[in-house]
Image (cartoon, helix red, strand yellow):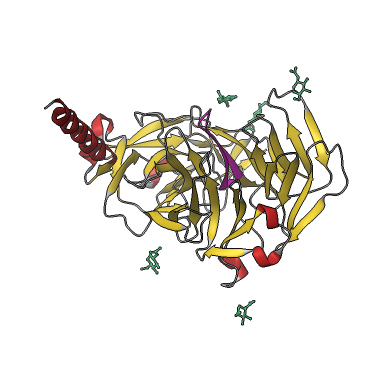
Amino acid sequence: MKIYQFVKILLLFVCLLELVLTCQYDWQCGNNQPFSQCSHDAFDLLTGIGYDDSLDRVILLGKFNGITSNANEPPYIASLPGNGGSPLQGDYPIITDSTTIYHRTQALIHYDQTLKLVYLEAAQYNSYGVGPYFSSNNSFVTTWRTTNLIPFGMYVDESTGDTYTCEYYLQRKAANGTSIEMLLQPVRCNHITRIGEKIYYVDQSGMYSLNRDCNQCRQADLVIRLPFYTTAFARSSSAFYFGVTHSFGTNYTGIWQLPIDRASDISYLKKIHSSSTHGLIFNRDAIKMFAATEDHQVLRFEQLDTTNPTSTTIYNHNQTTEGSCRCRSKFSGTDCRTCNPGTVRWLNGIPECVIKGTGPISCLQDYECKYPYGYCSNGYCKCQNDLTFSDTLDRCDCFNGTISWDNNGLPKCSK
Ligand SMILES: *[C@@H]1O[C@H](CO)[C@@H](O)[C@H](O)[C@H]1NC(C)=O
Ligand SMILES: *[C@@H]1O[C@H](CO)[C@@H](O)[C@H](O)[C@H]1NC(C)=O
Ligand SMILES: *[C@@H]1O[C@H](CO)[C@@H](O)[C@H](O)[C@H]1NC(C)=O
Ligand SMILES: *[C@@H]1O[C@H](CO)[C@@H](O)[C@H](O)[C@H]1NC(C)=O
Ligand SMILES: *[C@@H]1O[C@H](CO)[C@@H](O)[C@H](O)[C@H]1NC(C)=O
């Protein structure tokens, strides 16, 4: 009887949990609507993948409803359970993307399980910036810069806490944060790992190794030349895995396995899946590997050491009949009410988070943009000529200059 009751309560709990995570209508998204909404949008994946062992959740970077078709929508960090048992959930938006100060989020480079912190790579003027994104205050801190292609080589050694990066030099930052050692120079790489006393890195020509004690070494040992560029990389105790995107043609597109103890023998390089892959990650004990694909699927692999690895699709963006609750665009926080740094504006009973200085304010009519200083274009306020938005975004002005009028009777700035 007791067990029966326990099972009943458990089932009830499971059902409730399902109800919270999946939805059909906005009202099912708890007390926080209209700040949260039931979204049926497909989630398109950007490069990279993370995994949280304690939560058993796969961490993803992407955009709801199209990467290119929806330029004004911010990228999102979303997650889903490792068994795919409930739908993908939007966790928080990345609201630093901007065309005025050019910054465009491109890839999820690393997920710090302890701090629940993502490290992102963003295209900036003439380079890529890499660093942590803090959802608490919506700030991105550029910690490293690279002109190299995506992804940026970064590896956190869980047993020592050291962080290895490939920013022109292969360097190691001690866990205590005080020292940075230069292992190899110059080098630009996309992936790094450590096995025992050896550091392995992968660049666009292949895989190399060097001793972990290396101090300003000039050369590393070639392990293997690879016939493709790798966008994703992961390793278990017995094999390396490389994710290759479609840009290398159908012969190479997919996930490749290379046994560690045969790493220099190309005849052991074996394709285990044919999906164009830009994210690979193992769970901590390397029992299961997750892959993010270019056709917006998340796959789970098991029994990779055997001749019959299994793969299961745990997310497919084509299947969006079940909605998931998420914060409205640019809102964040557990109650979806945080609009930082920004101000909340209401339009037909729907809140909108207007971010200061980074992007345009939405509008329906010119007067909402304080015409003639501003005007409404394709649903967003723009400033006339070279006028710029005030800090509070409530008007366009000519700061530190004087307004004069052009031939069309519209304001311009003379400094
Ligand atoms: C945001 O929060 C992080 C972590 O608390 C902090 O290191 C960072 O300086 C903050 N950034 C801003 C702009 O407040
Ligand atoms: C920080 O770590 C490095 C490398 O492990 C070590 O050499 C150094 O003494 C440590 N510094 C402090 C202040 O603990
Ligand atoms: C792909 O593989 C096929 C069959 O092995 C071969 O005929 C073809 O030339 C390869 N294509 C490229 C681009 O390497
Ligand atoms: C998703 O749908 C498109 C269009 O119907 C199809 O071409 C594609 O193969 C589907 N992708 C997956 C992973 O099911
Ligand atoms: C105007 O000038 C002040 C003082 O020189 C400066 O701090 C501010 O950034 C300027 N504002 C603009 C919009 O250029």
Residue drawn at point x = 51 percent, y = 49 percent: 409
Residue drawn at point x = 87 percent, y = 39 percent: 216
Q: Position of residue 378 (x, y in %)?
A: 42, 54
* Left or right position of 159 against 32: right
Q: Position of residue 249 (x, y in %)?
A: 59, 72
Nearest the camera: 213 or 357?
213
Looking at the rendered image, the quarter that the N terminus falls into is top left
Secondary structure mainly formed by the magenta segment: strand
Residue drawn at point x = 61 percent, y = 50 percent: 238
Nearest the camera: 66 or 320?
320
* Left or right position of 334 against 401: left
Nearest the camera: 56 or 245?
56
Magenta region includes residue 120 = yes
Q: Determine the quadrant in which ligand 5 lies.
A: top right
* Residue 203 vertical position relative to residue 113 in the rendered view, above or below: below
Residue drawn at point x = 83 percent, y = 47 percent: 186
Question: What span is colored magenta in the figure?
Answer: 102-121
Which residue occupies the extreme left position in the image?
1
Counting the numbered discs, the total is 0
Nearest the camera: 371 or 394?
394
Q: Is residue 226 visible?
A: yes
Q: Examine the image and state in which quarter residue 168 appears.
A: top right
Magenta region includes residue 325 = no
Q: Position of residue 241 (x, y in %)?
A: 60, 55
Q: Is residue 69 visible?
A: no
Looking at the rendered image, the quarter that the C terminus falls into is top right
* Residue 263 vertical position relative to residue 399 in the rendered view, above or below: below
Q: Position of residue 368 (x, y in %)?
A: 38, 41
